[in-house]
Amino acid sequence: MKEPKLLIYIVSYNRIEYTKGTILAIDKIKPNNSQIIICDNGSTDGTREWLDENQERYQLGIIKPEQNLRVGGAWTLLTRYYKPEDFDYILLLDNDCWILPDTSWFEQCLEIFKLDSKIGSLGLFKERKPGYFAKEQIFDSSFNNKVKHNKIEYFDTVYYAGARLDKFNIWHQTMFNWPHKFIGDKIGRYYNSLGVRTIKLHPGMIVDISTYDFKNKNHIDYNKNFYETERDIKEYERVSNLSLNKEEVLKFVKTNFGESHLKFIL
């Protein structure tokens, strides 16, 4: 059987330390038949220079639009470079998404896709503890469809974050003429209109590291802006009430990613 071809697509804008951590983390666990491509949305903090210097080391494909296209624009731009049949799957990451070093994550995801040919996307559900994402049953009253795998029930959803694994041809068809700069649940609803199932959970675990950035004293304000302005979602309460234990977070990062990753958040 042919090994599936995976495109790993990272969208970055400044926050160079997060970007370094994201690339280092995924490079350690990427499948053999995969390609990392990063779209830098006009960074001014040295990100582009760092990417150029490390392009060969991490075998990066680099796209450099002259202006900040936001996530939606960066995704649409990628469709101009590739055809729907060029890859089987696409892993979509923001530049602060660190996947934990579990080399079996992609195989686990493929098992979920095999349960139903209509499944086109596996999206993350985020917990408030650093590095923890739900795999247990979480009921979504809007949807009744679900699949069961290894005694875990996975529910359909339209919620979409910038960290998910999609079938490439469906994603390409959707994004080729996508009219919005933002993503949100519009993509999930469009998938559903095509009869494509969008599953809320997948076995991969990703750390949204900007939430735990102790080097940036303004990270709470940043998250407020991200949730309220960038995403137009009134969820600041979940950020301001976030209980962060610095030592717990540092221990988690050191244990899972190694001491070298501490410099990205300290």
Image: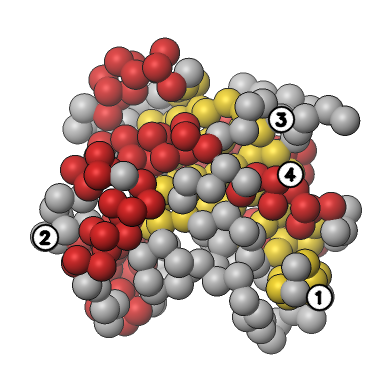
Name the kind of residue labelled 2 in the image: Lys
Disc 4 to disc 2, C-alpha distance: 38 Å
Q: Nearer the viewer, residue 51 or 28?
A: 28
Who's the residue at 32% across and 31% down the image? 42
Circle 2 SS class: loop
| Residue bearing mark 3 | 5
Q: Are marks 1 and 4 in contact (CB under 8 Å)?
A: no
Left or right: residue 99 compared with residue 113: left
Give residue 229's position: percent from left, percent from top. Answer: 34, 64
Whichever of labels 4 and 2 marks the residue nearer the N terminus, that label is 4
Q: Which residue is farthest front?
A: 255
N-terminal of the pair, mark 3 or mark 2, is: 3
How many other residues sit within 10 Å of disc 2, few (<14), some (14-19) or many (≥20)?
Answer: few
Relative to 143, is 181 above or below? Answer: above
Q: CA distance from mark 1 to mark 3?
A: 28 Å
Q: Earlier in the sequence, mark 1 or mark 4?
A: 1
Residue 201 to residue 59: above or below: below
Residue 225, percent across and down? 28, 63
Q: Residue at x 87, y 58 (%)?
A: 116
The numbered dot on residue 217 is 2
In this rendering, would 175 be left or right of 77?
right
Q: Write down the residue under mark 1.
A: 145
Q: Are dots 1 and 2 in contact, CB under 8 Å?
A: no
Mark 4 Cα-neighbour bin, 10 Å: few <14, some 14–19, many ≥20? some
Crowd band around label 3 with a 10 angstrom C-alpha radius: few (<14), some (14–19), many (20+): some
Q: Secondary structure at mark 4?
A: strand
Label 1, secondary structure: give it. Answer: loop
